[in-house]
Image (cartoon, rainbow, N blue to C red):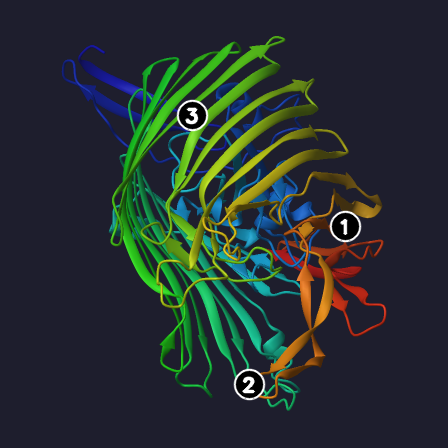
Amino acid sequence: MLAGSYRLNFRALGYTELTEDISLAGDETVEFYVRVQRQAIQLEGLAVEAERSRERIRFEEAGGATIREIGLSDLKQIPGVGEADPIRAVEVLPGVVSTSDFSAAFHVRGGSQDQNLILLDGVPIFSPFHLGGFFSVFNADMLDRAELQSGGFSAEHGGRVSSVLQIESDPGDGEFGVDAGISLLASRVAVGGGASEKALNSIGLADLKWRASVRRSYFDVLLKPVFEFPYHLTDFQTVVEGWTHSGDRLVLTAYTGDDVVDLTRLELEDFPLRINWDWGNDIVGLRWTRARRGGGSLDVRANLSRYGSELVLPDFADTNFRSEINQRQLRVDLDTRPLPNVQAKVGASVERMGYDNLLETGGSQFGGGIGSGLLTGSYLQASWSRPREWVLEVGSRLDLWHPNQGDQIMEIAPRVALKRFFNDGNVALKLAAGRYTQFLHSLRDEDLPIGLDVWVVAGDRAPPVVSDQLQLGIEGYAGQDWFWALEGYTRTFNGVVAVNGADDPNDELDDILSGKGLSYGADLLVRKETGTLTGWATLSFLKADRTFPDTYSPFIPQPDVTYPPIFDRRIDFDLVLRYPLPGGWDGGLRWNFGTGIPYTRPIGAHRYYLPDFLRDQGLLDRDGNAVVLGERNGSRYAPYHRLDLSFRKTFEKTWGSLVPYLDLVNVYNRKNVLFYFFDYRARPPTRSGISMFPILPTFGFEVRF
């Protein structure tokens, strides 16, 4: 612009008009911050003909990655036990397998549950589950959206090989508000607000908004007058978002939560052992983002994450169990647009990870160990697009792992994705291939329905996981209402681990087995996005296996054993619907069907023979049996299926809103098997099953003001 004086008028719908006078002296750039006041306006009713959703934008601009999103409204309409749960909701997405009603842990396309990278506002969280996996630590009232990348994710993400689940918090609109709720599991409250003009000036920010939530189970409090209920959980989560006068964005995220099982105050003759067991997560993350001229941004993050559990037996002072893993991370990401149709992103990170596991009794240690390492990672990725014709993404990661015990490991992970559009941009064929690496493992026994994670990092005891993946798919829109997607994939896993049941107590390095895995399958998704009846249906086919050395074999070298893991569910079908009901109620439905998961079936039993070498004779132990097991995971449970319904109604009041809800779990009372018991004392031997959830009504209410 030429030198001189100018008058700028700022107008925006819903805000007061503002006029600013500026003077320019020659060819110069002037930056200034404008703050306008909100102004309520009254409009006549508007009919929205169409809306370009986030999903549509992703379809048109993303490459070959498989990304599925669940918003807050969808989340609260999916029936469940107690209250809305973002991780439980992930189970309804294609390619995701859950093995039990009692665990929210999930498996994606043949990967183990520890191979999912779970992020809260970009901060990794190791084990985001309460009650051994029964439900997650995330409060739905704090949620903006949940996004699962189940395959083909870009070089930006490292550290896990199976999937990336991003949970984004909602900092609110800056106005004071309260969201609260009571369910059968816990009571919760979330409070949000902003900062006054005086406070903003004192801290040098242009705007600030925040939200914080607290959740606690209450059975121990309600039952205290009559019974010492031994369990409770607590959660605290907060997010603070601030904006500087120059347009920079600052975000602070924090979470802390604990589960406590306290049996020290119980007086039960049948259970004399006193136990105090607690576990939980602590995370904090700080993020600074600066928008760049011409598009793109600079992003700097500092994250801390910790998970730990500890078991104390007050009656046995020399017995102790603890497990802890922590991660400190600093990362920088730069996003640029050198050309209108080219986007480039480069980043680097430094992470320190360490674990401390101990199982000690009687002065002797069993398993456990201490380990740590430094991970330096960098990546470069670029994308080129020709709107409604082509999208090409190429990139690569370079990870250097420096363990304290073991040799340095360098892994290069190239990735490529391609999308080709047809039918005026409404149908796309896509391809993605890449290598993914992971430098930590959970030693949790996934065959158990409920359990806790015990983490170790790669080193002289365990190798890193390296997974090569390929997927091919086609997806598209049929009009404005329908979206569909069909994808096939294959994955290899090298470096998966399992606990060695035949380890030598004198060898500290043989308690973990290293093996390999393979999975392949296909996923189908059909979703109706608009109209009175909305929802989606998914159909997934999966074949997965794991291969480990047979440590019980007497042969040298020991042969390998290949078997299907517990999450090898061949067919999984999910139907989720949302629909209006009479009287202003909203209904939700979920029906899930899955073929049986594998288990190891006993094929026989015999009495123990107790030899008496002094008398050169022996006898049979009539009180016990030695069980002969069949092929590992060679049998399968009966198929699983369950129908859940939800009913919600919003009552608008002058002070806010009240939402009562009712969820019916397992409406037709299907007896889905958790595991079998075999009684060999009966003649003939009998088999009985322990079932998962019976028909279970749960209810609660939510308030907002």
Pair 1/3: label in front: 1
Q: Residue furthest front?
A: 616
Instruction: Identify the residue position indicated by label 1 in the image.
Output: 644
Viewer-nearest residue: 683 or 693: 683
Disc 1 or 3, which lies upstream in sequence? 3
The quarter of the picture where residue 50 lies is top right
Residue 602 lies, in percent from the top left, at 71, 60
Disc 3 or 2, which lies upstream in sequence? 3
Residue 466 lies, in percent from the top left, at 41, 38
In the rendering, which numbered label is found on residue 11? 3
Residue 423 lies, in percent from the top left, at 63, 8
Q: Amino acid at mark 2?
A: Leu
Instruction: Identify the residue position indicated by label 2 in the image.
Output: 273
The relative height of residue 347 versus residue 654 in the rendered view (above or below) is: above
Q: Secondary structure at mark 2?
A: loop
Disc 1 or 2, which lies upstream in sequence? 2
Residue sitting at 46 percent across and 67 percent down? 279
Residue 264 lies, in percent from the top left, at 52, 85
